[in-house]
Every structure is written in structure tokens, then in C-alpha cells.
Amino acid sequence: MKDTNKQFEYIISVCRDLFAKKLQDYGAAWRIMRPSSVTDQIFIKANRIRSIEVKGVTLVDEGIRPEFMAIVNYGIIGLIQLERGYSEADDMSVEEALEYYDKYARKALDLMIAKNHDYDEAWRLMRISSYTDLILMKIYRTKQIESHAGQTLVSEGIDANYMDMINYSVFGLIKLEFGE
């Protein structure tokens, strides 16, 4: 399990580095996004991954790796937006955005460690395409919860679904980076 933790932390550090660079380029412009728009952005990324997996070819010179990275980063953005609410302007400094990023990346790692303990690293036996399908399922669940104004009867909330999307994406990135 120690290898998994190190691999997870490495992948998160790569995603965080990209997030930090984009913060330098664009600021926290994503602060204007409502959570439902973040969910739709994650859908676009996951749908593209599935399209590439099914078709086996891309016409845009980017593979599935950057899309999984985007899901990690948009998942964290979604969690920030759920906590803070959306804004009418870029109202967050680079430093503050990275503090929030680290907070939710740590929560994702803690969740992965707990679930990995209970499931005995079953994710390692899964196909990357299954992570894609699970992410898409979580997106559809999230959209349903959003259509109910965030209310559920017995199910986990939007935040739990974002966390699972992050973790499935990290699993896909680990397999892409380190192999089966």
C-alpha cells in the first residue's frame, strides 16, 4: 500500500503543478463557475476519454492523460466551489487557491487510503476504461443530485461524488504512468 500512497501523491503533485501554472496564467477565473458548470466541464473531459477509448484515435493532439488530470483539477475546483460558493469575479489569490487545493487533495488521499484498505487495492485489477465509466456514472449521479438542489434521501452528496471522480482519475493516471 505504501507504493500506492507514493504513486497517488506523485500524480497529485503533477496535477497540482499544472493547476498552479494555470493559476499564474489565468488567475482563479474558475471562481465564477457554479458547481453545475464544474460538473458539466468534468463531463466533457470524461466523455472525451470514453470517445478516445471507443474510437481508438484522436484528431486533437492530446490523449487521455491530460483529460484525467483535468478531472482531478476540476474535481478539486468543484469541492472549493461547494465550500466557498461561486463568485462574480476572480476573488482568490494564487496562494489561497493552492491552500484549498492542498486541503482537498489531502482529503482525497485520506479517502483513497481508507477505501484501499477496505477493498484491498481492487482498483489495480480494473481496466482504465472502467474508471472512465465509473466517472461518467458519478457525473450522472451528481447531475441528478444537482437537479434536486443538492438534497438526497439516502445517498452521498455532490462532494462525495467529486472525491470519487478525483480518485478514479488518479487511479487511471497511476496506471498510465506506472503501468499495470
Image: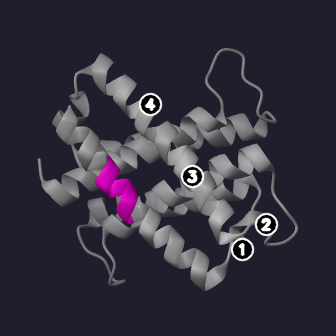
Q: Which residues are magenta?
A: 9-14
Q: Position of residue 2 (x, y in %)?
A: 20, 35
- Image side of residue 28 versus residue 105, left or right: right
Against 36, residue 51 (above or below) is: below
- Image side of residue 170 versus residue 122, left or right: right
Q: CA distance from mark 4 to mark 2?
A: 28 Å
Residue type beneath disc 3: Ile
- State the residue at coordinates (45%, 71%): 18
As drawn, the label of residue 32 is: 2
Q: CA distance from mark 2 to mark 3?
A: 15 Å
As drawn, the label of residue 112 is: none
Ranked by sequence position, the earlier of labels 4 and 2 is 2
Q: Nearer the viewer, residue 70 or 109?
A: 109
Residue type beneath disc 2: Ile
Q: CA distance from mark 2 to mark 1?
A: 6 Å
- State the residue at coordinates (56%, 37%): 161
User: Mark 1 — residue?
Assistant: 29
User: Mark 4 — residue?
Assistant: 111
Ranked by sequence position, the earlier of labels 2 and 3 is 2
Picture colour scheme = one colour
Against 163, residue 85 (above or below) is: below
Label 1 sits on a secondary structure element that is helix
Q: CA distance from mark 3 to mark 4?
A: 14 Å
Q: Quadrant of the N terminus?
A: top left
Q: Position of residue 72 (x, y in %)?
A: 47, 55
Label 3 sits on a secondary structure element that is helix
